[in-house]
Image (cartoon, helix red, strand yellow):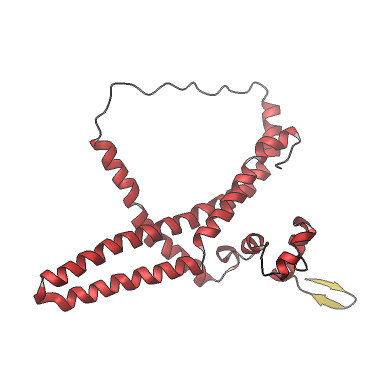
Amino acid sequence: RSSAGGVVKTLTPDALGDIVSGILLPPGFSGRSPGAQAGQDHTAGLRRYLREPLIAGSAFTRSLCLLLNGVYGAFWAIIPTIGSIGAALRPQGDCAPPEIDALPTPDHHEHARLIDEVQQPYRDRMAPVDALADFYMSLYRGSFVMNFVLGALAVLFGLLSYFNYANQSLWLRVDLLALSIILINFVASRVWNWHGRALDYRFIAEYLRQMPMLAPLGRSAP
């Protein structure tokens, strides 16, 4: 909040978005550009980051995202489990893994400390974005693995309703429930755009990942 001429002004998320986009984006990306007037939203990634629900959303939104991450995480765990089972069944060769030499310890500790001080701010800014990218990619991957598993179960329940006629109504209800969850899961993934958010945050994180190496050289990412 700031006061100018006796008028109190509040910095809102929309105003913050306008300020940051005015600084970071070229003039051609403004709302007055032909692309924006034609319906092309070039600032979606930036506005999505500033209005991130896990940061600026309500406690209910954050709790819901964490709950979904736990549910989807259980389904995503199926993939590495299958991989570990396949690796255990694969015949092992006699070749030993190559030995990797330990990294040398720097002799000039003061130089290493100064370089670390230059790099640390960039690592601090990359860490939360990297965590958001991992979080949303976990949601996206877990959601489609869940859909594949439920799709297979829906086919199984349909077959059971045909061959187990005595409990046909039960299997049909369970089959309908599985199909409903698949539909809700698909719509939620598209409405909340988990894949798009994961890609946006991954792009920003990898962009910032270069900076700890470039900053001590006085360079910046292109």
**Residue nearest the viewer, comparing 190 with 221:** 190
Determine the residue positioned at 23% across, 65% down: 155
Residue 216, quarter of the rendered image? top right
Determine the residue positioned at 75% across, 57% down: 25
**The N terminus lies in quadrant:** bottom right
Q: Is residue 142 left or right of residue 173?
A: right
Q: In this view, does 30 lie to the left or right of 6?
A: left
93 in relation to 161, above or below: above
145 in relation to 116, above or below: below
Q: In this view, does 180 lie to the left or right of 141?
A: left
Give the image location of residue 121, x and y in percent.
68, 45
Determine the residue positioned at 27% across, 40% down: 86
**Residue nearest the viewer, comparing 135 with 222:** 222
Determine the residue positioned at 64% across, 20% down: 107
Residue 6, quarter of the rendered image? bottom right
Give the image location of residue 75, x and y in percent.
34, 57
What is the number of callouts on the image? 0
Give the image location of residue 87, x and y in percent.
29, 37
